[in-house]
């Protein structure tokens, strides 16, 4: 992936998140405080706006800058988690060899650590982790990435939310998609679109 493709990835993510901003906030209203759509639009808009300042940077540096921008601009609990994901990806892209498998695996580990979550807690990790695992197992098979991200997102509906505001609902959180898992699905859907163009 070159830095121009990273830019396309971020622009596609922003437009998907903008189109679905209300849905994301409504999902967060059910199990949280109703700001996830607003938080994500603010963060990815800031990323897209920064790209002109990053023209001289390589893929690794751009991904790391995306991470720090998301940490500082998103506002909610999701910001540092998406931010960690991108910083870990950026570190892995210092070498091209196996960068996706290595970066996504370290991103999922970083999110789990920082959020103190496990797979199955109905958070965005339930999308990042299966995506990392499928790339680890099969390489960058983008159709498989799409399927893993979609299944991970849909899987959060059956799960009880164990972390973040949704955890306060206990078993009443079952039956609702996790908002951070849905926005993470858009992120990976945008990646697949960028890489299969
Ligand atoms: P906030 O909860 O601060 O309002 P957002 O609404 O932007 O932040 O993000 C909520 C999403 O963040 C949740 O749907 C979940 O996926 C994710 N999340 C929140 N806390 C954690 C955590 N400790 N570990 C992993 N993911 C989390
Ligand atoms: Mg929220
Ligand atoms: Mg909030």
Image: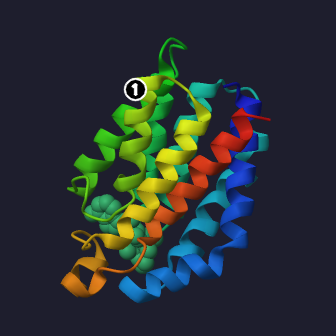
Residue visible at 57% across and 29% down in the picture: 141
Q: In the drawing, does residue 74 fall left or right of residue 4?
A: left
Q: Is residue 160 above or below residue 32?
A: above
**In the rendering, at what x and y percent does residue 195 appear?**
70, 33
Q: Is residue 138 above or below residue 104?
A: above
The reply to whether residue 38 is visible in this rendering is: yes
**In the rendering, at what x and y percent does residue 123 appear?**
34, 63
Graded by Cα atoms within 10 Å as few (under 14), some (14 to 19) or many (20 or more), the crowding at tag 1 reads: some
Q: Is mark 1 within 8 Å of ligand 1?
A: no
**In the rendering, at what x and y percent does residue 78 appear?**
42, 63
Residue under numbered circle 1:
136
Mark 1, secondary structure of its residue:
helix
Q: Is residue 55 above or below residue 7?
A: above
Residue visible at 73% across and 39% down in the picture: 194
Quarter of the image with the N terminus is top right
Closer to us: 69 or 165 = 165
Quarter of the image where one finds residue 132: top left
Q: In the drawing, does residue 42 fall left or right of residue 51?
A: left
Count every numbered label the image shows and give the total: 1
> Quick check: which quadrant has ligand 3?
bottom left
Residue visible at 71% across and 69% down in the picture: 18
**In the rendering, at what x and y percent does residue 13 appear?**
67, 54
The reply to whether residue 54 is visible in this rendering is: no
Closer to us: 135 or 94 = 135
Quarter of the image with the C terminus is top right
Closer to us: 188 or 164 = 188
């Amino acid at each position: 992936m070159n830095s121009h493709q990273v830019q396309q990835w971020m622009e596609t993510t922003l437009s998907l998140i903008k189109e679905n901003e209300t849905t994301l906030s409504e999902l967060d209203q059910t199990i949280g405080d109703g700001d996830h759509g607003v938080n994500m639009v603010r963060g990815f808009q800031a990323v897209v706006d920064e790209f002109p300042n990053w023209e001289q940077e390589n893929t690794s540096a751009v991904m790391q800058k995306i991470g720090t921008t998301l940490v500082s601009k998103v506002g909610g609990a999701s910001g540092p988690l998406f931010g960690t994901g991108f910083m870990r990806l950026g570190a892995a892209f210092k070498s091209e060899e196996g960068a996706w498998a290595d970066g996504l695996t370290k991103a999922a580990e970083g999110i789990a650590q920082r959020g103190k979550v496990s797979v199955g807690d109905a958070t965005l990790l339930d999308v990042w982790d299966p995506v990392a695992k499928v790339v680890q197992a099969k390489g960058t098979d983008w159709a498989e990435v799409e399927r893993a991200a979609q299944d991970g997102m849909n899987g959060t509906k059956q799960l009880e939310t164990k972390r973040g505001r949704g955890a306060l609902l206990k078993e009443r959180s079952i039956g609702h998609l996790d908002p951070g898992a849905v926005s993470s699905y858009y992120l990976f859907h945008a990646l697949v679109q960028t890489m299969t163009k």
